[in-house]
Amino acid sequence: MPKLILVRHGQSQWNLENRFTGWWDVDLTEKGVAEASAAGVLMQDKGIEPTYAFTSYQTRAIKTLHLALEACNRLWIPEVKHWKLNERHYGGLTGLDKQETRDKHGDEQVHIWRRSFDTPPPVLEAGSTFDLSSDPRYAGVPVPRTESLKLTIERVLPYWEETILPVLSSGETVIISAHGNSLRALVKHLSGISDDDITGLEIPTGQPIIYDFDDAMQPGERYYLKDS
């Protein structure tokens, strides 16, 4: 029975500092490193053995994957990185302190930017500090200037359908180490969650989510590995 493991990266430095991160590349904190390793220990303890891995182009997700796989002695498995698994792009909010942004723009406006389904934040200005258009990892990639959750889903799901699902269908146990919103996109699709309800779904850092698929490649109910 094919099995899918979803892991949101461990706590990052900007998670700790309460800043909008999006596509900006930040590292894990010590707590984030511990969360990632603990996810791997949990997989080993539960007898879950990933055989194929996917992650984004972002350090926090890549390191989480490697730490988790090292902890369960699976660091050798095939691994694919792709920008379509990156976090949602927070546009002009990138780098801003979340509370200071609320103080400036009001709780309601910031809530709309963060949690509405299809309203993106302000566009990131070209040439600004957090403009990634010249980053070598994104050479040839249409780097967005901002994204709503809806736009994030529109890049994540085709990658799921065209690349990840065929690997899963072949019988591999697939682990995806990614981000709050790119994983929200997958959970929304796999669990049939509405546009309104998905914006309220919280995905904790470093806690593996499991989907077991049947012979017709239909996913069962999602569950956290720690609760199994």
Image (spheres, rainbow, N blue to C red):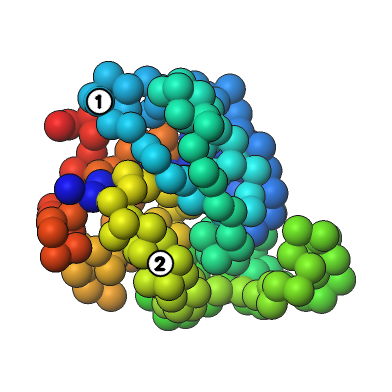
| Residue 43 at x, y percent in the picture | 32, 28
The secondary element bearing badge 2 is classed as helix
For the C terminus, the quadrant is top left
Instruction: Tell me, yes or no, if residue 35 can be seen here.
Output: no
Which residue bears the numbered disc 1? 47
Q: Residue at x 17, y 48 (%)?
A: 1
The secondary element bearing badge 1 is classed as loop
User: Residue flagged by tag 1: what amino acid is it?
Assistant: Gly
Q: Is residue 48 left or right of residue 118?
A: left
- Mark 1 touches mark 2? (CB < 8 Å): no
Judge by depth and name the residue closer to the eye, 9 or 67.
67
Q: Residues within 10 Å of mark 2 (few under 14, many from 20)?
A: some
Instruction: Tell me, yes or no, if residue 155 can be seen here.
Output: yes
Q: In the displayed structure, would residue 158 be above or below residue 219?
A: below
Which residue bears the numbered disc 2? 160
Q: Residue at x 17, y 31 (%)?
A: 227
Ranked by sequence position, the earlier of labels 1 and 2 is 1
Q: In the displayed structure, would residue 95 be above or below residue 127?
A: above
User: Residue flagged by tag 2: what amino acid is it?
Assistant: Trp
Judge by depth and name the residue closer to the eye, 13 or 154.
154
| Residue 176 at x, y percent in the picture | 43, 49
Rendered image: mark on residue 210: none
Q: Residue at x 18, y 55 (%)?
A: 213
| Residue 221 at x, y percent in the picture | 13, 53
